[in-house]
Image (spheres, rainbow, N blue to C red):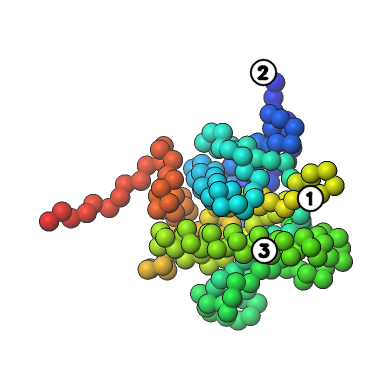
Amino acid sequence: MARRKKVYEGKAKILYEGPEPGTFVQYFKDDATAGNGAKKDVIDGKGVLNNRLSEFFMTGLNNIGVPTHFIKRLNMREQLIRQVEIIPLEVICRNFAAGSMAKRLGLEEGTALPRPIVEFCYKDDKLGDPLVPEEYVIAFGWATQQDLDDIVALALRVNDFLSGVMHGVGIKLVDFKIEVGRIWDGDYARLVVADEISPDSCRLWDIETGAKLDKDVFRRDLGSLADAYTEVARRLGVLPSNVTHRPKPTLIN
Ligand code: TMP
C-alpha cells in the first residue's frame, strides 16, 4: 500500500499530503508540550478531543462567513484542510490579562482589559516566539499593512464568535491564539484562519468557579488535562462517543 507523504511535523500535529492538490490532511497527536518543548507528556485522547473541538469551532466560523482552512473531519484524529501559506505570526487576542501579559505588565490574572487587544508573536521556536510590534512585521515583510488590518479584523470576529459560544456554556474566553494563512486566487490572496482552535491555544475559565479548562492545567500542573478538555467538549455537545464521561449523579426529589 502506498504510504502517505508527511509534509510537516509540529509539536501537536502532523500534516500529510491531501487527496487532491491544494489540500492537506491534518493529524492531531496526543503529545502535549509547554514552555516551547521544555515540558512534554503524552495525554491519552487529547488529539481526538482537539480534532473534534477544532472541527466544531472552524465549522461555526465557516458558517458565519469567517473563512478558515477547514474542509471536513475525516476520522477520529484527522481532518481535511486547505493548503495555505502560513503567515509566520502567532496572532493573540486577549479579553482579560493572563499569562505573559499579566507578567509583563504586573497585572493580576483575570483583570478585564479596556477592550480586546490583538498582539503578534513571531513564529520561531528557537527564539521562543517573541512578541513583535507591527512595525517589525511590515519592515521584515512577514505581512503587509493591509494584511495586518485584515488579520486584526479576522481575530476580532473570531473573538466575538468564540466568546459568545463559550459564554453560552458557562466558560469565559480569557485569550486565544490563531494562525492565519494566505490562499492565492491568481494574483490575489485571501486570508483564512488556519492551524487549530482548541483548548491548547485558548485560555478558558469556568465562569462560576474560575477553574481552568485549558492547557494551563498542564503548564501549571493543576490536574488532569484530559478531564479539562473533556469537560469543554461535553458542555459544547461534541464529546466523541468513545470518550466516556460519567456525569455526577443528580438527586431526584
Ligand atoms: P501567553 O499569555 O503565553 O502569551 O499566551 C496567550 C494565549 O495564546 C494563550 O491562550 C496561549 C496562546 N498561545 C499559543 O497557543 N501558542 C503560542 O505559541 C503562544 C505564544 C500563545
- Residue named by callout 3: 153
- Residue named by callout 2: 1
Placement of the C terminus among the 4 image quadrants: bottom left
Residue pushed farthest top?
1
The spot of residue 4 in percent (x, y) is 69, 28
Is residue 224 positioned above or below 48 on the image?
below
Toward which corner of the image does residue 39 lie, by quadrant? bottom right
* Label 2 lies in ligand 1 vicinity (Cβ under 8 Å): no
Give the mark nearest the N terminus, 1 or 3.
3
- Residue named by callout 1: 189
Closer to us: 215 or 151: 151
- The local secondary structure at tag 3 comes to helix
The image's mark for residue 71 is none
Closer to us: 19 or 60: 60
Closer to us: 196 or 47: 196
Is residue 69 positioned above or below 135 on the image?
above
Q: Nearer the viewer, mark 1 or mark 2?
A: 1
Q: Amino acid at mark 1?
A: Ala
Residue 178 relative to residue 139: left or right: left
Q: Amino acid at mark 2?
A: Met
